Amino acid sequence: MNVVVRAVGLREARRQHQLTQRELARRLGVTQNYIPALEAGTRNPGPRLRSAMLAMFGCEFEDLFDVVMVDPSTHVERRLRPVGEAVRRTS
């Protein structure tokens, strides 16, 4: 299994802070093309970038990121939930 951290809340956090993708990239020290890739889920932020994003937006990890386990042979994904988060069941 591979563990992947996706920045699923980045677009909303950026909009709430009224930042353009260009401005966010400049503040984080990444290329301008990296932010749309993070928002689209085609790139995943490393530990340093995750820490910088959490500090910039002043939020909790779960507000910005999802942690997903991916089976490399089948590409089946399973989202990991924080301890204490209720499992939602649909009928």
Image: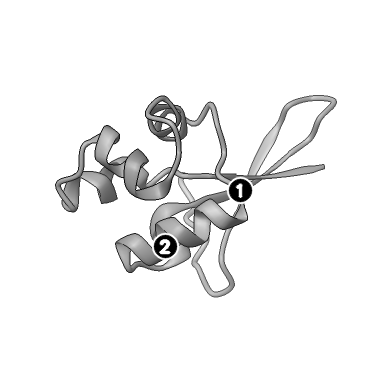
Q: Nearer the viewer, residue 60 or 24?
A: 24
Residue toward you, 77 or 8 = 8
Q: Quadrant of the N terminus?
A: top right
Q: Return the residue found at the far bottom.
A: 84
| Residue 71 locus on image (x, y percent) | 79, 35
- Disc 2 from disc 1: Cα separation: 12 Å
Residue at image location 33% in from the left, 49% down from the top:
27
Q: Secondary structure at mark 1?
A: loop
Q: Amino acid at mark 1?
A: Gly
Q: Residue furthest left?
A: 18
Q: Give the residue at x 51% y 55%.
A: 50
Residue 77 locus on image (x, y percent)? 66, 36
Please say if the residues under marks 2 and 1 sit with CB atoms less than 8 Å apart: no
Pinpoint residue 61: horizontal percent, then vertical percent: 47, 63
Q: Amino acid at mark 2?
A: Leu
Tell me the residue that label 1 is attached to.
Answer: 46
Secondary structure, mark 2, is helix
Tell me if mark 1 has few (under 14), some (14-19) or many (20+) residues whose alpha carbon lies within 10 angstroms of its own. Answer: few
* Percent position of residue 15, x then y: 19, 44
Reading the image, the residue beneath label 2 is 54
